[in-house]
Amino acid sequence: MRAQSEFRCCDSFVSNIVFLLLEGKDDYVYLPCKNNQTIENLFSINIKMLIFKEIQLLPEIFLGISLIYLIIHGTFISVNTRYLLIQNSVLYLSVLILSMFCFLLWNNAVECSDFQIFNNGIIVDFLSFSSKIWIAIMSIFCFLMIQRYITIQRINYFEYSILILFALLGIFFICSSNDLITAYLSIELQSLSFYVMAAMKKDSAFSVDAGLKYFILGAFSSSLFLFGSSILYGVSGTVNFEDLKNLFSSIHTEQGNITTSTTSIFTQRILLEGSLIQFALVFIFVSLLFKLAVAPFHLWSLDVYEESPTSSTFFFCSSTEASNLCFIDPNFLFKSF
Amino acid sequence: MIILSQNSIYSVLFLVLSFVSSSSVLFLLECEYISLIFILIYVGAIAVLFLFVVMMLDIKTIYLAKDSLKYFPFGSFLGIVFLSEILIVVPSIFESINPYSANFLANDYSDWLHKLDYFTEIISIGHLLYTDYVIQFLLSGNILLLATIGPVTLVLVRSIGTSKTQVTFKQLSRTYESVLFIH
């Protein structure tokens, strides 16, 4: 009997602790606080949710850390009077890293539900999960196909595969971004490594030309993205997609009875500035479509894709499109007017 | 003094002085973060860049003293316009908004709690940056790392026999006498 009371006491104590731990965060964790539940059950639910919520980002963190290790490894080996050619070994190492990334991602998939982590900056849902898995597997094949081209064309830089891995890190963050800041930073990470990859064949004037063109046009479209997002922030006061969705859906519901006095002042203001929101969304769309090379904005892609090394082109075509489409699809299309 | 000094390097240094004074005005207005960023960016980057450009271009000093009298009427006109703007705007700003301030009942207390326990801007920005926006912070760090790797990759020429190792003895044995001077 005493043991049971202690058990009860311990139970409530643990639930209090867990509640305190969870209290500071705005989340959707189901928190069972009933006394008749066993302590194992309580632990297995709460602690599991506690641990697995933020660690859903473990694959990306693993990729980033292993990237830094790879850079250190390559730098220490290649800066040498004997000038060792390690690009093939680094390429195979990056294939290994990507396959381990896939494994970690697959491990996460058990918990795969629709929730947001890191101050709602990262969304973990089935779309981001599946697109990440697809992009990782496809880029493993990309690596294996590129390898022979690199050997023949003598692109003897181990940084090539590191740059591809950086681009992939950016792409994975684009897939799971739920925030305009995260989206912009990851797009920049991806495109910055693509500029270097386009200019990678240093003895070819075409390649350098392609890198410069890609850099200027990419910077132009990024500036459009920043302009649009700053207008969106100025009008709505938030950069989070979830908040934007709530805001716009409330406007949609209140748009019908605009003449009645029940409409809030805030909604009236937003309705007045609705054209400004559309203006901002058009800018963001234009920049993303520019990066995707979709029909009215596709003329730059001919030059860049032709002149950059074929292996880089192969990678630009396959991965960028997928990631950007994944970003555009859920976040914007159903939130815009 | 930025415009009037004959030597262009001195004028760049006066520009630095004006940046520092404007950032100290911001500091007095309790905008520490903006003023520090102002010093860091304008003095640390842009003014030093100007200084390098001025030193590299090696501009001949032109004596502008006799020409300066020609621009005196227009310059004094501009000066009068700006002075009158300041004289119109500034007294209206410093008029008190609180209507009771001139009154006998003016509630002129000081909030000691806020004076003892407060966040500065830098503390709050740091708190936000390292807790809520840590992923964005790490991403921007990755971008900076990539921005260092990329140019090195594009520029560095690697071949057999050239090594980029540091020879400490060679560095330490350099003296100012063996350095080549170009006049």
Image: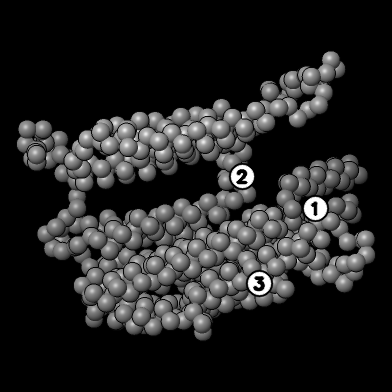
Give amino acid for label 2. Leu
The relative height of residue A47 versus residue A205 in the rendered view (above or below) is: above
Please give the chain letter of the residue carrying mark 1: A
Q: Which residue is pictured at 42% across the width and 70% down the height?
A: A217
| Front disc: 1 or 3 | 3
The relative height of residue B158 versus residue B182 in the rendered view (above or below) is: below
B152 left or right of B113? left
Q: Position of residue A226 (x, y in %)?
A: 54, 61
Q: Which residue is pictured at 14% across the width and 57% down the height?
A: B162
Residue B12 visible in the current orientation: no
Query: Disc 3 to disc 2, how far (Cα)?
Result: 27 Å
Quarter of the image where one finds residue B109: top right
Q: Position of residue A195 (x, y in %)?
A: 37, 68
Q: Which residue is pictured at 26% across the width and 73% down the height?
A: A201
> Are tags 3 and 2 found on a single chain?
no
Give amino acid for label 1. Ile
Q: What residue does disc 2 label?
A: B128
> Are tags 2 and 1 found on a single chain?
no
Quarter of the image where one finds residue A166: bottom left
Q: What residue does disc 1 label?
A: A39
Q: Which residue is pictured at 44% across the width and 68% down the height?
A: A218
Please give the chain letter of the residue carrying mark 3: A
The relative height of residue A25 versus residue A71 in the rendered view (above or below) is: above
Q: Which mark is residue A332?
A: 3
Give amino acid for label 3. Phe
> Are tags 1 and 3 found on a single chain?
yes
Q: Nearer the viewer, residue B33 or A93?
A: B33
